[in-house]
Image: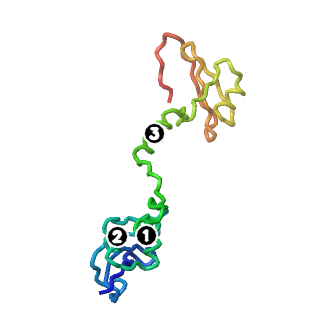
Amino acid sequence: MAVKIKLKRIGKIHAPQYRIVVADARTARNGRAIEEIGIYQPMNDPSIIKVNSERAQYWLGVGAQPTSAVTAILKVTGDWQTFKGLPGTEGTLRVAEPKVAKVLVFEAAVQEAAKEPKSPTRKPKLDVAVDAPKADVAEAVGVAETVEVVEVAETVEVVETAEVADVVEATVVEPGAEPTDVA
């Protein structure tokens, strides 16, 4: 019985993945296999190639013929050179860089954010000087009309005039006197 080492396709339409199998030469591409000896995933960068070297050497030793694609894969892994007795048995297989764990990336971002100064989330309050002229007070408060300044218990209070109302009446409260409600 003629035995071949060939690729058995699995995977989706645009995402091929292959199993490296030992099968009868007369079987279909995805037909029944005698043994599965490896996998090949060409869509990853670098491609994922895993071959059970011991089983590949056994099947090559008993006369199994690899297809051209499998021969190329075995050359990359170094199994073909081992079988033929050629130099370069370590192969030319590229190894992907180890991925950094997402938890470590997150913790680094948190530490980086902790080092940055915090920006104020609220707008700063207006600081109006008590001794400022009326025009400056009106500009600082943002009132288009006039502003009346009234003394209340030895402090200055800014009273805004409403745009709709004509005049806001203010009463002068003497220190120590009870304030009365004026309606």
Q: Residues within 10 Å of mark 1 (few under 14, many from 20)?
A: few
CA gap between label 3 and label 2 equals 49 Å
Q: In this rendering, is residue 33 above or below 173?
A: below
Report the side of 132 relative to 84 (left or right). Answer: right
The residue beneath circle 3 is 110
Residue 175 horizontal/vertical position (percent): 52, 11
The residue beneath circle 2 is 56
Quadrant in the rendering for residue 135 = top right
CA gap between label 1 and label 3 equals 55 Å
Disc 3 marks a residue whose amino acid type is Val
Q: Residue 30 has which mark? A: none
Identify the element where label 2 is drawn.
Answer: helix
Q: Residues within 10 Å of mark 3 (few under 14, many from 20)?
A: few
Tell me what residue is drawn at x 36 percent, y 66 percent.
51
Q: Quadrant of the N terminus?
A: bottom left
Residue 40 horizontal/vertical position (percent): 40, 69
The residue beneath circle 1 is 84
Identify the element where label 3 is drawn.
Answer: helix
Q: In this rendering, is residue 78 above or below 177?
A: below
